[in-house]
Amino acid sequence: MSSLEERDVGVAAAPGSSSAGLGVGAVGAAAEAAAGVAAMQEEVGLRRGEGPEADPDEPPKKRAKIPEGESGKLEERLYSVLCCTVCLDLPKASVYQCTNGHLMCAGCFIHLLADSRLKEEQATCPNCRCEISKNLCCRNLAVEKAVSELPTECTFCLKQFPRSSLERHQKEECQDRVTQCKYKRIGCPWQGPFHELPAHEGECSHPTKTGTELMGILGEMDQNHRRDMQLYNSIFSLLCYEKIGFTEVQFRPYRTDDFITRLYYETPRFTVLNQTWVLKARVNDSERNPNLSCKRTLSFQLILKSKVNSALECSFLLLKGPYDDVRIKPVIYHHSFSNDTNETDYVPLPISDSVECNKLLAAKNINLRLFIFQVQK
């Protein structure tokens, strides 16, 4: 019996008490109160994580696993914070920010600048509508590094890798990446996962083909090679001409005087081969609303401003300027210039795709290099 119960019994047996039944009732109430206090203390202890005293012989408890949904919440929040404000996707290359800190991937940033040039408007941030340009905006290197460390899924093996190492994994390390047979050059069409390549190459029938069968395949390869070499041979032939001139040209943006103005480009007058020339360029062949088109192209024409006594047979081509990174595939054009036919037709500027076109439109000016070869009669 506890000391509290002993004290209660002592009080009940003391002389002067009114009744023995009262002492017995007090003992029962005290016992009930003590039990209630103990229960409350135990409950508070459990809430605090104290619990009953641990048994030293009991094996240590494993730490509770965090649900998979909880671990992904941080990544989801980072995705929403670091994504591009235009396409709402994580940037894959450079990240630009406006003066208020809103992020844009390089592709969307260039596209906004190109659209503003086509619409003759000032480019603005989609979030805060502050002005943006290549001078006002800057790259955010911290965000670029943070995005490169976020996990992403390999498209072949579906495993998670940091974005910075995903490209190397997919090109060199992934065992499920799509690869081709080493005998592709002699006609083997096989494509499959990398881990199946050794087995296929061990069974491939193309190494055992006869010379007659291989001659047809080699004929197609030679034809493709001749087509590629034809351009370079033509350029080498033009370099043998007596009169060759080249210059750096700068296309500047202008607007037509029509009711619906259209964007066009024109260079200042320049002199090559003792003649004065001008280049003009237009977007999507002067389409009414080229800003609504996903596919964008540039075409140009060469104009002779000088007066000539006889026809001037010329070949010409445009290449990228010395400080630009635009990709242009050389194409040689020919025209006979005279006082009556002093303008060429509009011919395509041979850029690879619409992305390269947007790069040119987003720039303040378009800087290229023009070569003119005069054909001697």
Image (cartoon, rainbow, N blue to C red):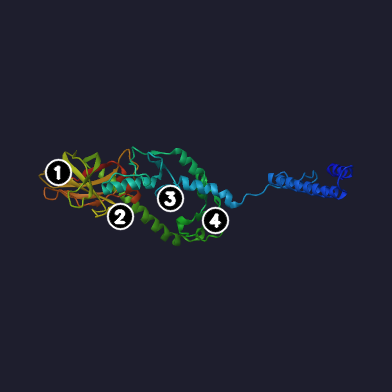
* Amino acid at circle 2: Leu
Residue at mark 1 to residue at mark 2: CA–CA distance: 35 Å
* Residues at discs 3 and 1 in contact (Cβ within 8 Å): no
Q: Position of residue 96 (x, y in %)?
A: 40, 41
Q: Secondary structure at mark 4?
A: helix
Q: Secondary structure at mark 3?
A: loop
Mark sitting on residue 197: 4
Q: Does residue 240 appear to the left or right of 79 in the view shown?
A: left
Q: Position of residue 161 (x, y in %)?
A: 54, 48
* Amino acid at circle 4: Leu
> Which residue is rendered at x = 24% and y = 42% of the image?
252
Give the camera-side residue of 281 and 118.
118
> Which residue is rendered at x = 38% and y = 40% of the image?
98
Residue at mark 3 to residue at mark 4: CA–CA distance: 38 Å
Mark 4, residues whose alpha carbon is within 10 Å: few (<14), some, or many (≥20)? some
Mark 3, residues whose alpha carbon is within 10 Å: few (<14), some, or many (≥20)? some
* Residues at discs 1 and 2 in contact (Cβ within 8 Å): no
Residue to which mark 2 is pinned: 292
Q: Secondary structure at mark 1?
A: loop
> Which residue is rendered at x = 50% and y = 55% of the image?
178
* Amino acid at circle 3: Leu
Tell me which label, 1 or 2, sits earlier in the chain.
2
Residue to which mark 3 is pinned: 88
Q: Does residue 366 appear to the left or right of 19 in the view shown?
A: left
Residue at mark 2 to residue at mark 4: CA–CA distance: 46 Å
Residue at mark 3 to residue at mark 1: CA–CA distance: 49 Å
Q: Nearer the viewer, mark 3 or mark 1?
A: 3
Mark sitting on residue 305: 1
Q: Position of residue 168 (x, y in %)?
A: 51, 46
Residue at mark 2 to residue at mark 3: CA–CA distance: 20 Å
Q: Nearer the viewer, mark 1 or mark 4?
A: 1
